[in-house]
Image (cartoon, rainbow, N blue to C red):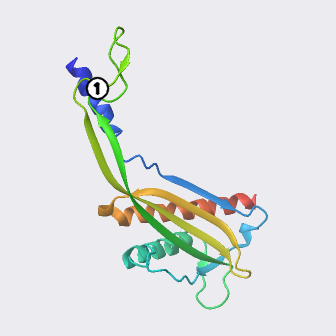
Amino acid sequence: MKSKHILMTLLLLVGCAPVCTAMLKSDYDRKYDLVKLHTWDFKTQNRKPKDTLASNDLWERRIREEVESDLSSSGYHRVRDGEPDFLVAYYMGTREKEDIRYLGYGYPGFWRGRRWGWGWGGGAVDVWNIPYTQSTLIVDIVDARNNLLVWRGYDTDTIDLNKADKTIDKGVENLVKRFVKEAQKEKK
């Protein structure tokens, strides 16, 4: 019985990380020829005071550096003077959230046995409130000639504030890879 309790506790603890499952999604104009995009630059963006990136220069720089590195390694060339094929805009929002977990034998809705049926209570219940920061990173690809959005990707993830650099870098890397993959898919 004790080993069953330990196993149950371990299984519950493994699932105790914040529930925010990372999502990577994108959408693009299927009629637009993404293959013709070769050169790029950053779109000038005016950040509002409450914008996460307006108040955090460190995250702003990390996103810019990672976008530049990932696009460059994928064969896209940044044009600072002249007219690029596309512009890159990016946004990040964060929200403080909480994950509430019930641990122990007495969590609500447990099975008491054949005779007792479903019930509430019975046994010790630990209620854990786990705070975490959820972020959404959005990367837009905009046609530089007509200022139309042609591709948008977003990554929703949990930011470990102690490792924000790795979380942000990974989110940007995932989005750029997705853009490159979809642009190459259009080529076929």
Q: Amino acid at mark 1?
A: Gly
Residue furthest to the top? 115
In the rendered image, residue 132, in percent from the top left (x then y), is placed at 34, 55
Quarter of the rendering occupied by the C terminus:
bottom right
Please say if 103 is above or below 114.
below
Task: Give the residue furthest to the right.
Answer: 31
Q: Looking at the image, which residue is at 56% across and 65% down?
A: 176
Rendering quarter of residue 71: bottom right
> Residue at coordinates 37% horizontally, 76% vertically from top-left?
58
Q: Position of residue 3 (x, y in %)?
A: 23, 21
Identity of the residue drawn at 29% across and 47% down: 129
Relative to 96, is 147 on the left or the right? right
Element carrying mark 1: loop
- 139 or 51: which is nearer to us? 51
Residue where numbered disc 1 is placed? 121
Q: Would residue 5 be visible to someone looking at this image?
A: yes
* Percent coordinates x, y for residue 139 in the rendering: 56, 68
| Quarter where residue 73 is shown | bottom right
